[in-house]
Image (cartoon, rainbow, N blue to C red):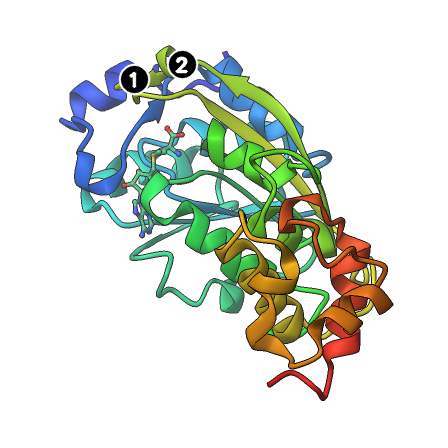
Amino acid sequence: MIDTLPPLRDVIRDHDLRAKKSFGQNFLLDLNLTARIARAAGDLSGADVLEVGPGPGGLTRGLLAEGARRVLAIEKDARCMAPLAEIAAAYPGRLLVIEGDALEVDALAHLTPPVKIVSNLPYNVGTELLIRWMTPKDWPPFWDSLTLMFQREVAERIVARPGSKAYGRLALMVQWRADARIVLTLPPEAFTPAPKVSSAVVHITRLAEPRFPAKAAILERVVAAGFNQRRKMLRAALRGLHPRIEELLVAAGIPPTARAEEIGLEAWCHLARLLEGRAV
Ligand code: SAM
């Protein structure tokens, strides 16, 4: 037991919180498990935590019990407000709940650094939020680490290395500016209701600076062009970017006959630098 609040099954029954598909609701009811996820985010004691989609509050309780300085929880489903208010009352001054859409709420206004983001994300908005958090206008971003639940297949795309099927834009976008690893994998039965697929928690720690220099917009463009036609050789897939792309590929140390999935981050960044000011 991590606190004196009622078991989550009772909370769900008492507040008639039957999971709704439209909200992407798959709840974690095992408080030992939510405490484990909270611990995967590292020491929370001096940090504000942003949690998207607290639902009935299993992970929220884990975060508070593990010592988070404050938790800002953004939840779209109005039915969750009453159970979340009970948690806030049990942890005075440490939980702020905002009812709203995480894609629209200005969370930053309510957070004091250092900030960690920890969420069992709704699958329908998970990747979009990750991309937003990874691509702020300026680097470093407002957060220090992300500890996020995804469908396992998405988690594998985030941590993928060159040469694997899962390797692509998501891996490059995240690994350019952060370290990412899978810290926990969970079978469907860990959730209520059980989703169709397994899930995994990814822990992402931001770097102070990108791993290799490049302009974000150009890197994104060249990587997108390469992987949009991932079966093609790069000299063909990237033809539209520059009339002498073959020369630039060679200058970046990339065989023009290679395919996007064979090319590591450093070489992508090198190519992006060569394209700077020349991309057409
Ligand atoms: N954190 C809870 C847990 O682990 O049991 C619930 C996780 S459930 C997978 C996703 C939660 O996100 C749901 O409570 C859902 O209502 C909420 N949600 C869905 N879309 C949202 C959005 N755009 N903004 C904020 N919350 C959202």
Q: Position of residue 242 (x, y in %)?
A: 64, 79
Q: Is residue 111 visible?
A: no
Which quadrant of the figure has residue 207? bottom right
Furthest-bottom residue in this view? 277
Q: Which residue is mark 1?
A: 194
Describe the element under mark 1 as helix, strand or loop.
loop
Q: Residue at x 37, y 21 (%)?
A: 197
Ligand 1 image position (quadrant):
top left
Along the horizontal axis of the image, is 243 left or right of 188? Answer: right
Residue 145 at x, y percent in the picture: 67, 47
Numbered marks: total: 2
**In terms of image quadrants, where is residue 222?**
bottom right
Disc 1 to disc 2, C-alpha distance: 7 Å
Q: Which amino acid does the dot numbered 2 rest on?
A: Ala
Q: Mark 2 Cα within 10 Å, few/some/many (few <14, many 20+)?
A: some
Q: Quadrant of residue 164?
A: top right
Residue 190 - label: 2
Residue type, label 1: Ala
Residue 156 lies left or right of residue 11; in this view the side is right
Residue 68 x %, y %: 61, 39
Q: Are marks 1 and 2 in contact (CB under 8 Å)?
A: yes
**159 displayed left or right of 189:** right
Image height check: is 155 above or below 221?
A: above
